[in-house]
Amino acid sequence: MYKDTESDNKNSIGSAIQYFRDTYHISQSKLCKGLCSVSTLSRIEAGERDVDAFILETLLERLGKIPNQYELIVSDFDYEAYRRRTKIIKLIDNKAINEANKLIKDYGEFAAGKGSPHIQFILVCQANINELNGGYPETTIDILMEAISCTVPDFNTNVISDYFLSNSEFNIILDILHKMISLGMADRASKILDQIINYLYWHNQMEQNTRIYPKVAVIGGSLLLDQNDLDRALQICNKGIEMNKSSRRIDYLGELNLIKGQVLEKKYKALGLWETYDKEECVSLYLKAYHLFSFFDDITKAQEIRKHLQEEYKWVDID
């Protein structure tokens, strides 16, 4: 929710940004890297400058905060930009491609010179449209790479740990990773996964990373399982399950238990120990995954697990 505020509250958002930046011991240069200049951030924190709401949103998200929990001063431009964005996203969701393309072009002219978050939004929309139009998947990846480079220009040089990423920026990177895996681009996907894991390691104090890691673990665990990097896949899954428990959420927990079960099964078979292994841990993991998928009405995955338990483990009474 965005509210108009009185002039004496204009510095509240700047004070909040400075407070959280100091709390997490983040320098100005690292927080605003790729987004705005240090001098601009200094003026924001001092309350001396009105700034594009989308830059403020990104700064808050980079600090692990949800923007709608804070009062932002919304200018006429900001309000109109939100209105246009909402309409464009709705058109893309409804697959009204021609109309969406027209509004994206208009938005580009409307937001020209207003900052990198606007260019990033346009590029993400273009990537989505390319995918909807049945364009080359590689083109979608190229557009998304250009999008993330708007605010993380060093993305291709393995130094994203120098940044503090917003949820929007992180989701673009995860989308790139997922699409590369789908296309069998294992080498490039592995490099990006390494960047992500390294980033999460160096920024483990940030609250939102507890929520992000399980999703990363599902994508990364599947990739490493396919590459037979079983020890690392197991390590990532274990940490993802631990993170899920600490956040008291069950998102991705079914997938994580399933992947961990598959990893252990593959590992013991590769070591020639499968016949002597008591298999209790694998059965437990598969059953947890089965019940979680059933709870979320993912019948296809639940039935696949049921079939595997019956065929591999001679498990009959699953319910």
Image (cartoon, rainbow, N blue to C red):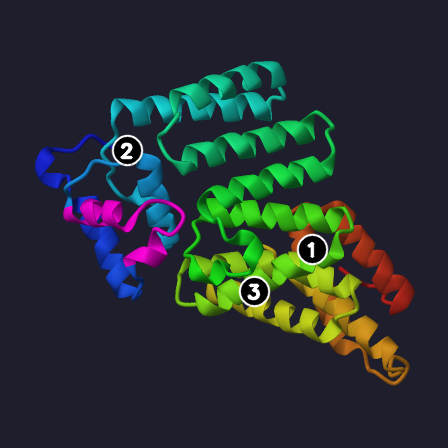
Q: Amino acid at mark 3?
A: Ile
Q: Is residue 65 magenta?
A: no
Give the mark nearer the N terminus: 3 vs 1: 1
Whichever of callouts 2 and 3 sits on the residue coming sooner in the sequence is: 2
Identified at 69% across, 55% down, the residue is 188
Marks 3 and 1, how far apart in space?
A: 14 Å
Q: How many numbered discs sit on the rendered protein?
A: 3
Horizontal and vertical percent for residue 11?
Answer: 15, 44
**Disc 1 to disc 2, how far (Cα)?**
40 Å
In this rendering, the answer to whether 12 lies above or below 23 is above
In the image, residue 301 sits, relative to residue 105, either above or below, namely: below
Image position, residue 87 (x, y; %): 47, 21
Residue sitting nearer the eye, 22 or 5: 22
Q: Which residues are magenta?
A: 28-46
- Which structural element holds mark 2? loop
Q: Residue at x 66, y 36 (%)?
A: 140
Residue at point 50%, 30% (across, down): 122
Q: Main secondary structure of the magenta part?
A: helix
Q: Amino acid at mark 2?
A: Tyr
Q: Which mark is residue 2?
A: 2
Question: Circle 3 sits on which residue?
Answer: 197
Pointer 3 local density, CA inside 10 Å: few below 14, some 14–19, many at least 20: some
- Nearer the observer: mark 2 or 3; the answer is 3
Three-letter code, disc 1: Arg
CA gap, disc 2 to disc 3?
Answer: 34 Å
Give the numbered dot on residue 188. 1
Disc 1 is placed on an element classified as: helix
